[in-house]
Image (cartoon, rainbow, N blue to C red):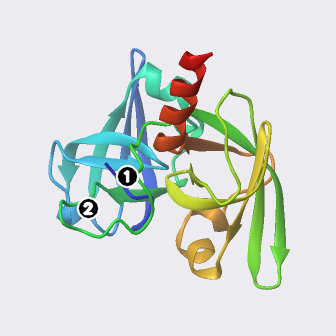
Amino acid sequence: MFTGIIECLATVTNIEKENTNVHYTFKAPITNELKIDQSVAHNGVCLTVVAINDDEYTVTAIKETLDRSNLGNLSVGDKVNLERCTKIGARLDGHIVQGHVDTVGICKSIKEVDGSWEFGINYNSDDITVEKGSITINGTSLTVVDSKDGYFSVAIIPYTYENTYFKYLKEGEQVNLEFDIVGKYVAKLMAKRN
């Protein structure tokens, strides 16, 4: 389990394809704290550390993960948001994030608004957002500002903008979306009642 509070950015240093799997090697400031078999969220995707070599570590993404996320778009030199799993007894500063991406969205708009930023995201799924509800974009826990069918926006404070992938995000780029787990359960229960 994760909280959506990004610890740092990691840089892709190598990509190796093996059948339908892809092995990604990253360089990150927290590599020396990682352990093999540890779960780490990369742009919101929970992946297992399979190798560590000095200041670099490797994870493997399977076809299902690549089909549901934007990881297949990564190139050497790209940056990703990084978060280690939550420790029991630690504060839950963001919201409950599983690290299981539901779908990708497209960044439709980026507006600077008096020192903060508003990002508009389009998506094509039956998942829903609600104003003031939680959403995870590339692993970052955020609050929905505007909510419509297939669209929502979020506001980004300067700290989040500077310390996550949002400062690199461009209009038209894919982002990983994980919808609020509580909302998903409520929607499923309501659908069963009909």
Label 2 packing within 10 angstroms: few (<14), some (14-19), many (20+): some
Placement of 188 over or under 157, stated as above or below: above
Label 2 to label 1, Cα distance in Å? 9 Å
Marking on residue 111: none
Which quadrant of the figure contains the C terminus? top right
| Helix, strand or loop for disc 1 | strand
Residue assigned mark 1: 26
Residue 43's spot in the image, x, y percent? 49, 50
Q: Give 55 or 148, whichever is nearer the viewer.
A: 148
Q: Residue at x 29, y 55 (%)?
A: 56
Q: Amino acid at mark 2?
A: Thr
Q: Give 137 or 150, whichever is nearer the viewer.
A: 150
Sequence-wise, which precedes: disc 2 or disc 1? 1
Placement of 177 over or under 163, stated as above or below: above
The answer to whether marks 2 and 1 mark residues whose Cβ atoms lie closer than 8 Å is: yes
Residue assigned mark 2: 31
Residue 159's spot in the image, x, y percent? 57, 80
Task: Find residue 175 and report its image quarter.
Answer: top right
Q: Amino acid at mark 1?
A: Phe
Label 1 packing within 10 angstroms: few (<14), some (14-19), many (20+): many
Left or right of residue 32: residue 68: right
Residue 172's spot in the image, x, y percent? 80, 45
Placement of 145 over or under 29, stated as above or below: above
Task: Find residue 11 and report its image quarter.
Answer: bottom left
Q: Residue at x 76, y 60 (%)?
A: 119
Placement of 100 over or under 168, stated as above or below: above
* Residue closest to the far front: 193
Q: Give 177 or 42, whichever is nearer the viewer.
A: 177
* Residue closest to the far bottom: 115
